[in-house]
Image (tube, rainbow, N blue to C red):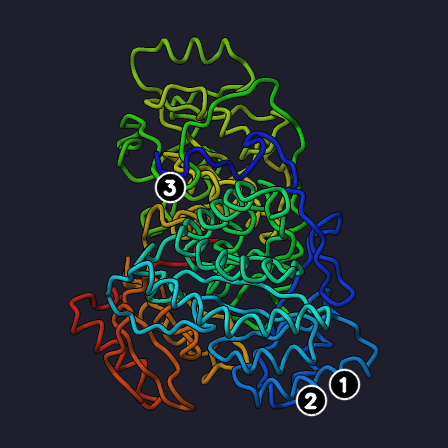
Amino acid sequence: MSEHTALTYCPDLLSYTRRKTREVMVGNVGVGGENPIRVQSMITSDTRDTPACVAEVLALAEAGCEIVRITAQTKVYAANLENIAREVRAAGCNVPLVADIHFKPDAAMEAAKWVEKIRVNPGNYVDKKKFEIREYSDDQYEAELEKIRDQFIPLVTLCKDLSRAMRIGTNHGSLSDRIMNRYGDTPLGMCESALEFARIARDNDYHNFVFSMKASNPKVMIEAYRLLVARLDAEGADWNYPIHLGVTEAGDGEDGRIKSAIGIGSLLADGIGDTIRVSLTEDAIHEIPVAQALVDLPRSPEKATATFAPSYDPFSYERRSSSPITIQGHELGGDKPVRVFTTQERWNALAHKIANMGDFKPEIITEKSGVIEIDPRDASAFSALNSETEPRLITVADGIPLAPIHAFRMLAFQADPRHPILLKDTLNPPSGETDFLEALLPAAQNIGSLLCDGIGDAILVRGETAPGQSLRLAYNILQAAGTRIFKTDYVACPSCGRTLFNLQSTTQKIRASTGHLKGVRIAVMGCIVNGPGEMADADFGYVGGAPGKINLYVGKTAVKFNIPEAEAVERLIDLIREHGKWIDAPPQPSPATA
């Protein structure tokens, strides 16, 4: 258990209660308090291109986006926010605008004149990142904080005078050298970085701000937000600031949606989050329906009739210590792979092509597994189970009027740890065909959240009724949760006005060339802002360095500079080869399952 175990982030791990916060006004839109969870996004146009920016803002607002962010990388870019804001308002659109600031306090000061909210990243607002390893004495540390105060207080004062809102948004991998050397690239470091800025704001009687703790790794993101909320609660009742949720650099397609649902959805299910942004490497308009669907997922208020002690530390990931067992020739539990189950009916439907299904293959048939179904509200069932001499595979019985996350937590809290657990995405499987997005998001939220809690030794997806798609979804959830890696992992940022190349087409080109490299993590970043820092734990990075030029990274270290974009994918492959992680693609890719 971690040093944070005395802290709590959620009043009840077994029922839904939304965290109570103060209201922060972003223009005419209230965030937190009694307001609904707000949906926001970010435009991709160059901030100097007024017509393009205005058109994109209006399209997002029409699609239901309630807050729109625009990058303002320098004072010159920030100054054009005046024109963008004027034209958006002239079109009759009152959607609040947010300036995204990195590195340039003078850009923030200019932007605050024209937009309703400023986003600052504490890791690079004043502090510099050289990735240096050094010890900071208390005096040196305080001297750095004094520099931050000198640069940050003028922005706080201006935002207060103009009734502007602010987001203090920390990103994993984008922490200052000062924070990194004292706390490491950790959820604790992310929290400390944000709290430093919040204390300066509060010392100046400014409270119209929200927090965010973004990461591309859902486990890190979930732990960071939980720790932040716990720290805010420990600071006192008046630290009840709203929370902005997001998984940064989630990627595109199915993978981006699954990763977002795991990170954002699991926190929403625990009552955390007042505004969300789904970051997809796609046109921003496609983020809105995904975000709206996540907000609208059912949050069961059904309460457990008894109180149980948590069986895990929610601030530090550790897999539940079950005992290994063998079912149908597959080991599961303990440190064995988390297995993928299917039903007998679906197995039969796929039997003719299972041998050719590659990594999306079903492993165990539920009806033949001997799994014990338990109502987690039935104390007598646990007495019988825990008196068994051998470990048994267990799951929650269908039809229980609890949300799956709460039901499986109850199961894990009461069952002896030696019994492995089969997770299910739904306790009420549908009888007819289902929409894939409607099945994908709750499955990723429910199973992914539990896996990030360390609960689960096998999974069964039933909300998606197509046999092949349900298996692909199951494996992709395992991949996104970092539980079982079976393909290349991509960290791809959403496009914005800083982007120096076409992120969507480039990401697809890189996927086509490297998608067979199991376990290799590749970051595709549009600019240096999202470069060495926010790639976090990627093995290799493809980063826009200048228009038409690409820098290549190994970890956080740039090793190839100013490569012409036309050559960059091949040079990336050469770099992967140099580091012994390249294998040739198999002659026949695994056939798509249907």
| Mark 1 touches mark 3? (CB < 8 Å) | no
Q: Residue 456, percent across and down?
A: 40, 34
Mark 3 secondary-structure assignment = loop
Label 2 or label 1, whichever lies nearer to me, is 1
**In terms of sequence position, does the residue under pointer 3 or pointer 2 come before the other?**
2
* Pointer 3 residue: 316
Q: Residue 175, percent across and down?
A: 39, 64
Q: Residue 49, percent across and down?
A: 63, 90
Q: CA distance from mark 2 to mark 1?
A: 8 Å
Q: Nearer the viewer, residue 172 or 579?
A: 172
* Pointer 1 residue: 87
Residue type at numbered disc 2: Pro
| Vertical order, 286 against 409 (above or below) | below
- Give the residue at x 33% y 51%: 359
**Quadrant assignment, res 161:** bottom right
**Dot 1 surroundings within 10 Å: few (below 14), some, or many (20 or more)?**
some
* Pointer 2 residue: 51
- Give the residue at x 27% y 28%: 324
Q: Nearer the viewer, residue 16 or 405?
A: 16
Q: CA distance from mark 1 to mark 3?
A: 47 Å
Label 3 or label 2, whichever lies nearer to me, is 3
Q: Residue 204, percent across and down?
A: 61, 62
Residue type at numbered disc 3: Ser
| Mark 2 touches mark 1? (CB < 8 Å) | yes
Residue type at numbered disc 1: Glu
